Image (tube, grey):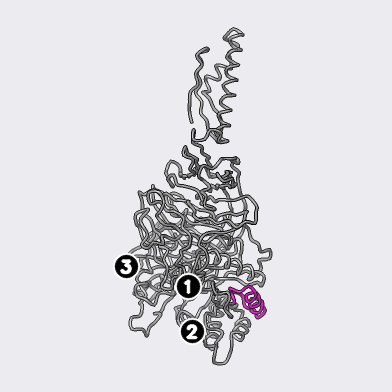
Amino acid sequence: MRFQLYDKSTGISLNLSLSHSVGLTTNRKKLQFLNKANNYFKPNIAIQMKNYIRNLFVAATALTFMIETNAAPNKLPMEWTLLSPDKKITFTIKKDNNETLSYDVHYGTKVAIEPSYLGLAMDEVNIADNAQFISASAPQEIKENYELKIGKQLKTTNHCMERTLSFKSKNGLAFDIVMRAYNDGVAFRYVFTGKDNKMHTIQNELTEFAVPTNGKAWIFPYMLNDRQRTCYEEYAEYEIPIRSQAPAKQGWAFPMLFNTNDLWMLITEAEIDGHYPGTHVDNSGNKNAYKIRFPEKEEAVYPNDILEPVSTLPWKSPWRSIIVGPELNTIFTSQMVTHLNPPSVIKDLSWIKGGRSSWSWWSEKKVRSYNRQLKYADLSKEMSWEYMLIDAGWPTMKDGGTMEDVVKYANNSGVGVWLWYDSNAGNEEKENAIMANPVLRKEEMKRISQLGVKGIKVDFFDTDKQKAMQLYIDILKDAMENHLMVNFHGSTLPRGFERTYPNLMSMEAVKGAEGMGQQYRCDMAPAHHTVLAFTRNVVGPMDYTPVILSIKNPGAKNPGIPRTTYAHQIALSVIFESGFQCFADNEQKYRSLPDEPKNFLKQVPCTWDESRLISGYPTDHTIIMRRKGNQWYIAGISGKREKRQLSFNLPAEFQNKKLVLITDGDNATSFGHKTITVNGTVSIDVLEDGGFAGILE
């Protein structure tokens, strides 16, 4: 804010600017002139001018105080700014003349988020409406190194600037808005700092995301399936106009990808601790801006549970996270979601080990044959995979053995076993609701841990209501106490749980390979795969169950015929990140592979020390490099139904190195194999919906 002060008696005028972050400044030349007044004027005139300057600064300081303390309501707007560590991102929160709170985000001079409303309706009162400003902390730097057990980069740094704004609502409720600015985006949350035993309810969260409309969006609809359950298993709407209405009233799911104002942006949420439901968005904001929406009443699980967040104080909302940068690689490499979660609560992490797994369900449906399960234990041993997963049906295992016998057999072969369970969310009173009933859950986890089971796959959560979000955490805690790793299936979206509870290896929340029995889904898969690398898999590990090479239901009247080539499927072992990577196909199919792809699957890791996007565009293609130790892996997939050449350049450090490649063969079900020396642009021919995978030597 700039203004001019003029004194008629002395003829002195001063230009001043007032900023909440830097205070009062004046025209420097005029101050220098006035400071030398004793040399040019008679003493009484110099004294007069000095007194004038002193009084002027006193008046201006008082004005600053009035604005900062909101002593002059409805007179002047207020704003607080936070810069990212590299100063490229500007995050601003404003309290305007009509007493509403809003925020905006800029990347350099480019608008990433236009002015967007902030606030909550808590206990029937909008806390942001006519809220009294109390204080603003100075920007503080956070820089903490930590290590994950799974992910695209295990050693990482939470580096940002943070600022806390404190307010009091018109009904006297104290609350903070915590701001963070990272080099790859911003985040904010609401925090209620009081302490009481009263149960409070948030009827509505008013947070909006006013994304500039001059661009494109890739967003997944938040849909209920035919059982009236949400499962995050829809295909994204591709390159739609920003702020388009969702195909169903439920709105849109996180994460949301945008390309606007020459910026890439991903919006999602992070850290849910059981005191808030998972949220999504609709277009009910100002001018169709995206606005936070709570779970749907129609969600069948916990039908009598309220949809709104409830808790005593103190209380905090999830982080609203906006990843932004000029390149798609900013989105791909971001680890903001885990940065926004608390550190690990597990001290001894030695028993937590990511790994690959065989899995019989995709090709066999019902896991009831003891002898067949032994073949998958043998497959994991032959392929050097760490685990096998025994899916639904194991309690009724037949033909000579039980689950316990399979575990003993596998462990003797050096293969760890995971077991499937129904979450029974909403059915805690059922006699066999093992995972939903705290007593039964603890007993079962202790039992199977003593048998030598390494992990559990818990399925069918099917809602984002608050009780379900608490159930995830309860399961992780009890599993932690029994040294069990966890894979959540039929689940919500990752929000960074894996930092606080490193025994979480993966979550589904994706239209995965399980659906490939239908032709429509087979047709959608190639482009879908290229989108997931920049959306769903950015925010956390993804249990897609890749590398399917056969027809899922070959005896069906209309079986789904895969569109992706075999090389495309091999590439998914690198493209998709999951700490528990289940390879889905029949054990015979993997055993019959040629040596090159078979050896690649024997070697490829599932946790990574570094990941880089080499080239890509959602729906078109994706090329990724990942490193484990000193070994680099590369993979590329095409989302186009056409033969083409994928051309790309590797960083200078890889020039003159050998690239050993598995490529498409003469047709979709065959492989090619070649070695090239990297020298400038690399070009690889791919078939329709094809791909490649390789190792740099």
Against 242, residue 221 (above or below) is below
- Amino acid type, label 2: Lys
Classify mark 2: residues with Cα within 10 Å, few (<14), some (14-19) or many (20+).
Answer: some
User: Residue 656 at what x, y percent from top left?
Assistant: 46, 59
| Front label number (3 vs 1) | 1
Mark 1 vs mark 2, CA separation in Å: 17 Å
Classify mark 1: residues with Cα within 10 Å, few (<14), some (14-19) or many (20+).
Answer: many
Q: In this view, does 574 lie to the left or right of 481?
A: left
User: Residue 689 at what x, y percent from top left?
Assistant: 36, 68
User: Residue 307 at what x, y percent from top left?
Assistant: 50, 62
Residue at point 58% right, 19% down?
53
- From the viewer's side, name the closer residue of 373 and 138: 138
Mark 3 vs mark 2, CA separation in Å: 34 Å
Q: Which residue lies furthest to the bottom in this view?
A: 400
Can you identify the residue that label 2 sits on? 366
Q: In the rendered structure, which segment of residues is drawn in magenta?
A: 434-454
- Amino acid type, label 1: Thr
| Front label number (3 vs 2) | 2
Can you identify the residue that label 3 sits on? 641
- Residue 655 in sight from this viewpoint: no
